[in-house]
Image: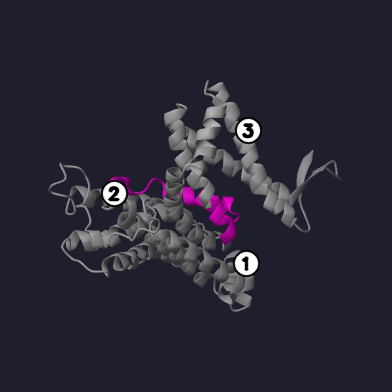
Amino acid sequence: MITLVRRSAASRRMAVAAPVAALLVTILLNLALYTVMGKDPRAVFYAMLLEPFISWPSFSEVLLKMTPLLLIAQGLAIGFRAKVINIGAEGQFLLGAIFASAIPVWYPQATGPWIWPSMLVLGTLGGALWAVIPAFWRVRLNASEILVTLMMNLIAVQLLAWLLVGPWKDPMGFNFPQTVMFQWDAMLPTLIPGTRVSVALLLAFAASGAAYLWMQRSFGGYQMVVGGLAPQAACYAGFSQGRAVWLSLLIGGAAAGVAGAAEVAGPMGQLQRSISSGYGYSAIIVAYLGGLHPVGIVLSSLLIAALAIGGDNAMVSAGLPVSAVEVFQGTLLVAYLAAVVLVRYRLVRSGVPA
């Protein structure tokens, strides 16, 4: 009989090697799957894992895709470390996009450098407000934040659909569910000339630095983690579990909201039904693949963004089905979680360490 016994101390070297090993295992498993499907594994490997980095146009799109993933994942990871599982980043992202779009939709003729910063502020507020409801239900009614945030994603999708086919629908949009195109001053400044990468990327890196300082170097971050992990010990020490829940959900909601605002004020240029390509759900993978550490999340967001762009390339050049990228991401997450278990635990067989 084989059992798992927790190690007295996890090796830091093994913890760093875990995501690398998970990536290698995922590549081998998926290349084998592509071979069974009748696809050329070399063509798939080149298109999905190499082409996004060797072509500047493709890499600029990777940076564009990385921006919302990094923003959302950094916010979610703070809550995850405090055992507050926010699955509602998708809805919070949509509310941030809706709140930010209010300015160019209601005032399409407005001009001035104040517009896009105001949109980011409104987006942050929208995402945070959408997180208030699950935070209240968790603290006051002890409702599961997992279920509440997940259900609120569906409400956000329907709210967006109602706005786009109702009061915010572009009358000149040929009956498409979308708003008017935003004016120039409502668009984020371009960070890299000749690309679609905006200053939101700098905002994402700034958020990563702030997350590192808060979680790794501040007493407030320590209080929040303790309040989530050990409520009784936190209460004895004078820390508040409720405060940890509120902060976790509000920070996660605000991060997702500003990502939604940056998306409508950046590459989209208007509010559409397709505003989110599952960023809120993909960011969960990014957060865990990065070990819930701000630095690791930067690297994992780059990897997942590259896989998304590489998957699009592979669909065109290697005939890969659209679901293949999702299978790759899922396999990567499972492989990483398995590697983390082996980092934290050792296998014991018949009382003898394996």
Magenta run includes residue 281:
yes
Give yes or no for contact between labels 3 and 2 (Cβ–Cβ under 8 Å): no
The amino acid beneath tag 2 is Gln
Give yes or no for contact between labels 2 and 1 (Cβ–Cβ under 8 Å): no
Select label 2 or label 1 by which is in front: 2
Up-down relation of residue 47 to residue 228 (above or below): above
- Residue 158 screen position, x and y as percent: 29, 49
Bounds of the magenta segment: 273-300
The quarter of the picture where the C terminus appears is top right
Residue 230, numbered circle: 1
Judged from the image, the secondary structure of the residue bearing numbered disc 1 is loop
Q: What secondary structure predominates along the stretch shown in magenta?
A: helix
The amino acid beneath tag 1 is Ala
Determine the residue positioned at 16% across, 45% down: 173
Q: What's the distance in space between the residues labelled 1 and 3, CA to CA? A: 40 Å
Determine the residue positioned at 45% across, 67% down: 140
252 or 289, which is in the foreground?
289
The amino acid beneath tag 3 is Leu
| Lower sequence index among marks 3 and 2 | 3
17 or 132, which is in the foreground?
17
| Lower sequence index among marks 2 and 1 | 2
Characterize the local packing of mark 2: few (<14), some (14-19) or many (20 or more) Cα atoms within 10 angstroms: few
Query: Image quarter for residue 81?
Result: bottom right
Q: Which residue is mark 2?
A: 158
Characterize the local packing of mark 1: few (<14), some (14-19) or many (20 or more) Cα atoms within 10 angstroms: some
- Residue 273 screen position, x and y as percent: 29, 46
Up-down relation of residue 345 to residue 239 (above or below): above
